[in-house]
Image (spheres, helix red, strand yellow):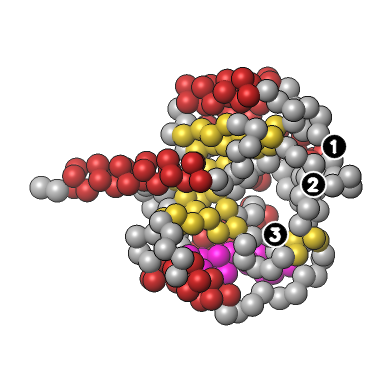
Amino acid sequence: MILGDTCTRGCRFCNVKTSRTPPPPDPNEPSNVAEAIASWGLEYVVITSVDRDDLPDQGSGHFAETVQKLKILKPKMLIEALVPDFRGDPSCVEKVATSGLDVFAHNIETVEELQSSVRDHRANFKQSIDVLKMAKDFAPAGTLTKTSIMLGCGETPDQIISTMEKVRAAGVDVMTFGQYMRPSKRHMPVSEYVTPEAFDKYQSLGMEMGFRYVASGPMVRSSYKAGEFYIKSMIEADRAASSSHSEP
């Protein structure tokens, strides 16, 4: 996680500390993070951050610089950036989408109908969907887009399916579903524990809708090892096919 440990937003499900005026980002962080990750011998890494509404570019430049420096050190490493909504600013989205990453991820967190009760008031479904659409438009061909929602926040099956359809219509390639777990008594309560069978059903439905990959289960989080392995295989297969088509 980059850009500090203090978020400018206060979503009802999240246990990250919040402040309107977090400390300024460390200008050396992109280089330090890139060097640290490069030394770990990873093939796939997820870089994420808090929201930084206090910064003129909302931290997008910091994200882009981290990705670029890591790609210089490890050109073959696959990088997923799990980013905030940047208030829907196209220039911020473009900066990150064109930084050289392989997967542009932004989480819509919950179904369309529950956005205002689950997320900070500065976030909303349309803004998040627009960010995912813009990322698809700005990023080079072959870049995947990805989002995630938590179940057990009070949503209905019909709302989940409708939200999935809208996410797919935005061109999103990968969607994940996990169980919401309450971090503390101060946070939003869990409305229900969704059955493994229901998670399986959403996975099947998502694949039928045309998502490239759907991970769905109580312990699935927006980034987790099995999904990263699958996405890595998918990207490598896409690139192998693309290079064979371009050969004379």
* Residue range corresponding to the magenta coloring: 53-67
Instruction: Report the side of 180 relative to 201 (left or right).
Output: right
In this rendering, the answer to whether 119 lies above or below 179 is: below
- Per the model, the C-alpha gap separating discs 2 and 1 is 9 Å
Res 107 visible? yes
Identity, as a three-letter code, of the amino acid under mark 3: Asp
Q: Position of residue 135 (x, y in %)?
A: 51, 50
Q: Position of residue 211 (x, y in %)?
A: 47, 31
Instruction: Report the side of 127 relative to 167 (left or right).
Output: right
Quadrant of the image occupied by residue 244: top left
Check disc 1 and report the residue beneath it: 189
Check disc 3 and report the residue beneath it: 51
Which residue extends farthest front?
A: 40
- Per the model, the C-alpha gap separating discs 3 and 1 is 23 Å
Identity, as a three-letter code, of the amino acid under mark 2: Pro
| Element type where label 2 sits in the image | loop
For marks 2 and 1 on the same chain, the one whose residue lies earlier in the sequence: 2
Identity, as a three-letter code, of the amino acid under mark 1: Pro
